[in-house]
Amino acid sequence: MTAVTAPPPMSLARRYGRDRALWTTIADVFAILAAFSLPWSTSLVAIFVPCWLGAVAWVMDWRAYGRLLKQPICYLPFAVVGLALLGTLWSDAAWAARLYAISPTLKLLVLPALFYHFERSSRGMWVFVAFLVSCALLMVMSWIVLIDPSLSLKPNGAADRGIFVKNYIDQSQEFALCAVALAYPVIILMRSNRMWQALALAAVSLGFLVNMAFVTVSRTAIVTMPIMVGVFALLHLKRRTSLILIGVMIALVGVLWVTTTDLRWGPKRLLKDYQLYKTEQTVTSIGLRLEFWEKSLRFFSEAPFIGHGTGSLRGLFERAANGYTESPNGDIISNPHNQTLNIAVQWGMIGVVLLYAMWLVHLLLFRGEGLVAWIGLLVVVQNIFTSLFNSHLFDFHEGWMYVLGVGVAGGMMLAAKQRGLPAAPAIPR
């Protein structure tokens, strides 16, 4: 009887080094870790995403990837990054500022790789579940920090009410997205008489809403949530159910209005701040934002076609602030708090057209029924409307929410279309 000898180490390395199934699993793990860490840490995301890219690239079918790049969902994000690179040629900013201004666009380069990978992977839903679980844990931690602010990792934890990490804007975007996204599976479960599972998910969704009502919430999230719910009702519910849902939303807004001081006094504060800004040049939140938008529109009118170039924003605001000290006119920023204006000032109408074309093709990607289509659509809708008040596509946290959400859901949609099936069960009508 002959003894069985183990294969040499080099043979094992060659065998597993090109094992597509193995490296697909490794890439899935890194994607799940990136989604799970996003609500908590920017550093971990910056580690896991390159690891994921390396695993995908190691066994990538480059011809298939090249064919995918011919689709507008892929080449339009590339075009935005390319325009940012070209914009450095006509910018008068220092090269350090030009290169720094390119970095917020680079995350868009990950989108085609996400489409490619999750068109072939069967674990896309795990990524969304990881993000949901992570946000639910953050919600629990938010309540704990509300009770004991000393547990916050923020330097001014006592001032940032209920914020464990990051800030209230990022936390509100996460909670709003999860709360509304859960509406779809809750209705599916209820209509299939799986009431306990539906009640469990509904309780999680309600937990996010209660936290936003009684702990902290951003005005941007409150403004965009009814829009997201309206999109859901319009696409997936009967008229009677839509009316009921609208009634529930009105009741919820009423509860928020009565119980949340920041919201109840918001309109009065906005009006007062606006009057102080106009009459006394007092530095107020609404005054600053109006000043940023007004100046940005003026900058855009000076170079409407190709803009002032990559990284030009801060220099433009510095020159506009010359002669002003303690007024909104003297505030120097590099972000006009509006995604369209951010792009328009730097790259003109060409950049704006590319931005809206990218949003449009990503919206159209998620036409149809299914949970995956709903998640992808919701991510795009949220980013579009929150970008009216912030440059959320270029912000780290909200930008990665967009890239991961659209990329994973988009890949799953492409796979479902190839099979001629919905990406997930549709809501029974």
Image (spheres, rainbow, N blue to C red):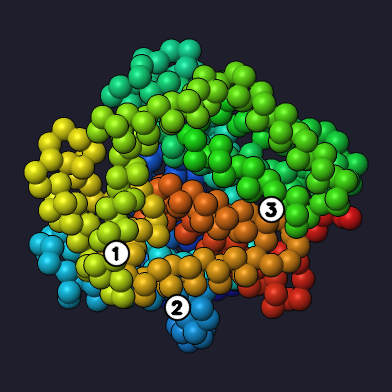
Mark 1 burial class by Cα count in 10 Å: few <14, some 14-19, many 20+: many
Q: Which numbered circle lies on residue 75?
A: 2
Q: Which numbered circle lies on residue 12?
A: none
| Residue closest to the eye, 253 or 184 | 253
Q: Residue at x 16, y 32 (%)?
A: 326
Quadrant containing the C terminus in the rendered view:
bottom right
Q: Residue at x 22, y 57 (%)?
A: 313
Residue 228: horizontal and vertical position, in percent?
64, 48
Q: Pointer 3: what residue? A: 231
Q: Earlier in the sequence, mark 3 or mark 2?
A: 2
Disc nearest the viewer among 1 and 2: 1
Q: Earlier in the sequence, mark 1 or mark 2?
A: 2
| Residue closest to the eye, 31 or 345 | 345
Q: Earlier in the sequence, mark 1 or mark 3?
A: 3
Amino acid type indicated by mark 1: Phe
Q: Residue at x 65, y 72 (%)?
A: 415
| Spatial CA span between label 3 and label 2 | 27 Å
Mark 3: which secondary structure? helix
Q: Pointer 1: what residue? A: 300
Mark 1: which secondary structure? helix
Q: Quadrant of residue 149?
A: top left
Q: Would residue 93 appear left or right of 121 to someone viewing this image?
A: left
| Spatial CA span between label 1 and label 2 | 25 Å
